[in-house]
Image: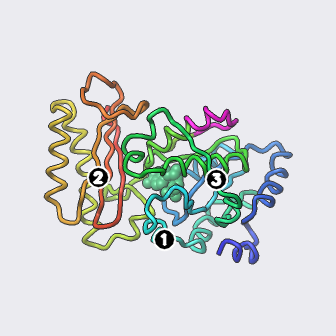
Amino acid sequence: MPERLCKNAISIMNITCTIREIQSLLRREKNKGNKIGFVPTMGALHEGHLSLIKCAKQENETVVVSIFVNPTQFNDREDYTQYPRNIDQDIRKLESYLSPEDMIFAPSVNEMYAEPDNRVFHFGGLDEVMEGLHRKGHFNGVAQIVSKLLTIIEPTRSYFGEKDYQQLVIIKDLVRQLDLPVEIRGCPLIRDADGLALSSRNKRLSNSEREAALWVPHLLFRARDMYATTTIAEIKQYVNDQVQSIPHLKLEYFEIADETQLSPLQDKQDSPYPRGFIAVYVDNIRLIDNVKFY
Ligand code: AMP
């Protein structure tokens, strides 16, 4: 599908599907002395993605948005095949945000993985808790694709959402390990008016599932309010009991962790910067969320 778009390239924006072409377009921008802001996405764009793009537009002369559903970061085949894809709609949304010098990079799987990527990354335990514990290989796949994209594009700055907070911490570590000359910028989590964290997967929720999903932010904020007066063990028990009582929901984890080390806390003394992290299945749709507790 990306090839079809590239062949019929729409005039006002640069849409490219090959590494060669994006690099050639970028050379032109870099020769002008332009700073490049890069926003990697898996498409099915919503206001959360668009907030990163707005931020990138404010801080750089040229913005690159990539749209690529990366197979190596999915530990669940069905989640990969069911992942929402609508590149035509994505391009229409981007048209009102991007300027003629900006670029959309929408490569195919073959373009990104012409050869299998066998690299194994280590993140000193950051990848062994929460998402890393429950989605085996997920962060290795994220590290593979993000390191490839950052090497291809060589942006000045790259933008990631706090929606995937653990991912943001791991990418900062990846860039440090590989000495990549890019500034990683974290951007705030954007919620719908009803509190649900915006996510491409929300598109798959039925009305009753969406109603149940609203308990996810509700419980996180409730847990945050309890934090001053209640033990961590009691808060965890409370969240667990509540999720169990709500139809459609199944808790995968709820942790209160230090936001830099990501180690789940047993004792409040162990971190001045605690954050609540949750992953919940709404029937077979997996949602994550997090909230600062300090
Ligand atoms: P994805 O397309 O899910 O891989 O997300 C691409 C980027 O958008 C990642 O850096 C995400 O953290 C970020 N993002 C996704 N949802 C939100 C949101 N609700 N608020 C802020 N950033 C988000």
Of residue 224 and residue 75, the one placed in the foreground of this image is 75
Inspect the image, locate mark 1, and give the three-letter code of the amino acid beneath it.
Thr
| Sequence-wise first label, 2 or 3 | 3
Residue 117 is tagged as: 3
- Range of the magenta residues? 173-184
| Sequence-wise first label, 1 or 2 | 1
| Sequence-wise first label, 3 or 1 | 1
Decide whether residue 133 is among the magenta residues.
no
- The answer to whether residue 51 shows anywhere in this view is no
Secondary structure of the residue carrying numbered label 1: helix
Number of numbered discs on residues: 3
Where on the picture, by quarter, is residue 82?
bottom left
Q: On the image, numbered disc 2 is attached to which residue? A: 252
* Image point (51%, 55%), residue name: 73
* Image point (71%, 63%), residue name: 111
Q: On the image, numbered disc 1 is attached to which residue? A: 81
Inspect the image, locate mark 2, and give the three-letter code of the amino acid beneath it.
Glu
Q: Are marks 2 and 3 in contact (CB under 8 Å)?
A: no
* Image point (31%, 73%), residue name: 206
Q: Label 2, label 3: how many angstroms apart (C-alpha)?
A: 29 Å
Residue 232, placed above or below residue 152 = above
Secondary structure of the residue carrying numbered label 3: loop
Q: Label 1, label 2: how many angstroms apart (C-alpha)?
A: 21 Å
Mark 3 vs mark 1, foreground winner is 3
Where on the picture, by quarter, is residue 75?
bottom left
Where is residue 224? Give x, y as percent.
25, 39
For label 3, count other residues whose C-alpha is less than 10 Å away and answer few (under 14), some (14-19) or many (20+).
Answer: few
